[in-house]
Amino acid sequence: MDYLRRTIDAELDELFPRVLSERRIVEPTVSLQALLTGQQPPIDGSCDLRLADYAAEIVDSGFPGLRGLTSRALWFQLDSYLRNAVDRDVPEQGLAVRKPESMLAWLRAYAAATATTAEK
């Protein structure tokens, strides 16, 4: 039973995106756990990541199972993820999607609008 639980946990772990500190690209220098438990560790540190590295991590998504894919394969997987959300997840929440392509277009427009620094 313990093996089954570990297997299920490992599978589920691959489904959820990770924040930058969980991707183990660099070693964190400040402990969030320490901060949340009232400790006052020094807030200090640096890493070798550059702006281009941060941008690449954002574009590559935080899904562990997608790390290391080529650009084309990554694009396909992320597009499939969104299509599955529209085709399956939204209806499971009790909402009808009459025009899935329209909802996907809205999601793309929303992503573009939230990803810009343009001021109104």
Image: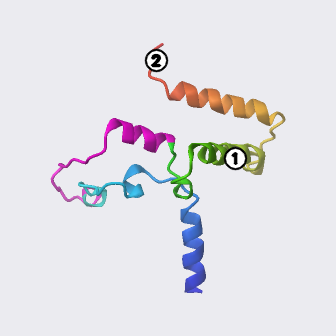
Q: Label 2 to label 1, Cα distance in Å?
A: 29 Å
Which image quadrant: the N terminus?
Answer: bottom right
What kind of colouring is applied to the model shown?
A: rainbow
The secondary structure type at the circle numbered 2 is loop
In the image, the segment drawn in magenta is: 35-59
* Residue receiving disc 1: 80
> Magenta stretch containing residue 21, yes or no?
no
Front residue of 6 and 90: 6
User: How far from the left and from the top, in percent, is residue 65?
Assistant: 56, 58
Q: Give left or right: position of 111 versus 97.
A: left
Front position among marks 2 and 1: 1
- Looking at the rendered structure, the secondary structure element under dot 1 is helix
Residue 51 drawn at (x, y percent): 34, 36
Q: Is 56 contained in the magenta span?
A: yes
* Amino acid type of the residue tagged 2 in the rendering: Ala
Residue 13 is left or right of residue 22, and the answer is: right
Q: Are marks 2 and 1 in contact (CB under 8 Å)?
A: no
Q: Quadrant of residue 117?
A: top left
Q: Nearer the viewer, residue 58 or 69?
A: 69
Residue that numbered label 2 is attached to: 118
Residue at image location 30% in from the left, 60% down from the top: 33
